Image (cartoon, helix red, strand yellow):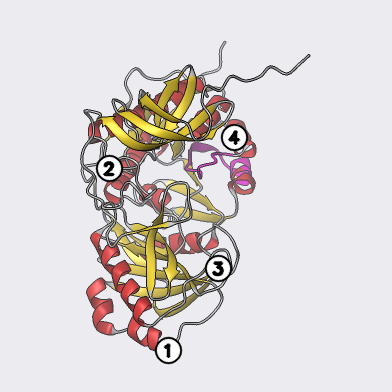
Amino acid sequence: MAKQKLNIPVKRGDRIELDVETLASSGDGLCRHEGYTLFTPGGLPGDRVRGKVIKTTPRFGVVDIFERTQLSKDRVDPPCPVFFKCGGCKFQDLNYEKQLEFKVQVVRDSLSRIGGVELPEKIETLAAEQQYQYRNKGSFAVQGKTSDPQIGFYSEGSHNVADSPVCDILLEPINKTKEWLRQILKKNQISIYHEQHHRGLVRGLVIRHSETTGETLVGLITNEGRFPRSFLAELTEEKNLKELGIVGIIQNINPRPTNVILGKENKVLWGKDRFTDKLGNLSFHLSLGSFFQINSAQTLRLYDLIDNWSKDAKGKTIIDAYSGSGGIALWLAAKENKVIAIEQFEPAMEDARLSAETNGITQCQFLTGNVEEQAPLVVSKEKVHTIIVDPPRKGCSESVVETLLESKPEQIIYISCNPSTLARDLERLKGYKIKDLRVIDMFPQTHHIETAVLLHREAPAD
């Protein structure tokens, strides 16, 4: 039998006028043309746009907008000068209330469509009071000529840097530190890494800053090689370091031809290998690559929510899986909970242990290793009341889900940064029912979504 020919009503290069109907989970505008789905990056619902078809597949196409003939009523003016080039933010041009509506709808659609999950009628949102200048970590790509380094985030769908002196969602001291580094890289003619040729020294920058302590940690991501003495002398001038709150400068060496930002080797060029952040009454020691939430104000609200959900676990064992630098584990242990933290990234575990010692917290045990191996060992030895999982975007492995089901905790708290893998994992967790669900806007002006879910074990049927 002859293969049925797919009827795609457009082809690459076609110019077309479309009405943007809604937003896809990617944050791109979504249109229909003769029943065919077309994505329009930069389009908002209510826009009428003209564009060129740049990609077609059997399921969807992509249109590059070159003109908006009608503007959405929800459009606002983005403050960022490179917003339309940069891939860091999607929504600086979208009214904030509509951003929140979009995030709730993505969670609702994902959980009901992928997971078949029964949802509460209303999903509560924890909106961010500070919608700009909230991000406490900047990871920048560096490209271009030695005489004119381009520093910023990649333009969407490319590996070309959208260079800008300021990023509006970063804490201001991070922008200042970046521009100071730009000037001394330029002045000292430090070679810039070339992706195709795999030559040159500087590949990127990572800058972390704490609003509460004023401390900044700087990471210079490099190919193999050394910085000249003249550069190091200027880099470590006391006046500038003091002014910028810099407590440590690290050379992170990444010789691999990879998109992964950080390499495995760190070399302290000056000062300490960690900086100190503070949330509430707790101090946290954080190294360059360890995980810590990037929005401190919203993190406090998340931690308080988890604490509230863990009230019934007092005097019982809580597992904090994928614990990163121990933020959740230490927060709960400080409230006199018995917590076992599991994390495979050794530097993050060192951070957590140091933070526990600084804060005088003794009710927290730290296990280094992956959750798949460590969690079964814990549940084989003791009864666990609550298991908290905060996995990476890929979600929990089947083995972790099996451990959750076999250990039968009274409740599971699932913190997710990816609604689709959250939906998949909730569907797997048979015998658990959603008791509470919140969307926490950890990332204003972007399409990224943080969701917290409280699951209770259902009583077995008679």
Q: Quadrant of the C terminus?
A: top right
Highlighted magenta segment, given as a residue range: 376-396
Amino acid residing under circle 3: Asn
Q: Residue at x 22, y 46 (%)?
A: 130
Amino acid residing under circle 4: Val
* Tally of numbered discs: 4
Which residue is at the far right? 1
Q: Would you say the residues marked 1 and 3 are in contact, meaning their CB atoms lie under 8 Å apart?
A: no
Indicate the position of residue 388 as horizontal and vertical percent values. 47, 40
Indicate the position of residue 243 as horizontal and vertical percent values. 22, 75
> Marks 1/3: CA distance?
21 Å
Identify which residue, 271 or 244, lies in the foreground.
244
Q: Which residue is mark 4?
A: 401
Amino acid residing under circle 1: Arg
Q: Quadrant of residue 247?
A: bottom left
Is residue 456 among the parts visible in the rendering?
A: no
Mark toward the viewer: 3 or 2: 2
Q: Which residue is mark 1?
A: 229
Q: Residues within 10 Å of mark 1 (few under 14, many from 20)?
A: few
Q: Residue at x 39, y 40 (%)?
A: 448
Identify which residue, 159 or 408, lies in the foreground.
159
Residue 280, relative to residue 354: is it above or below?
above
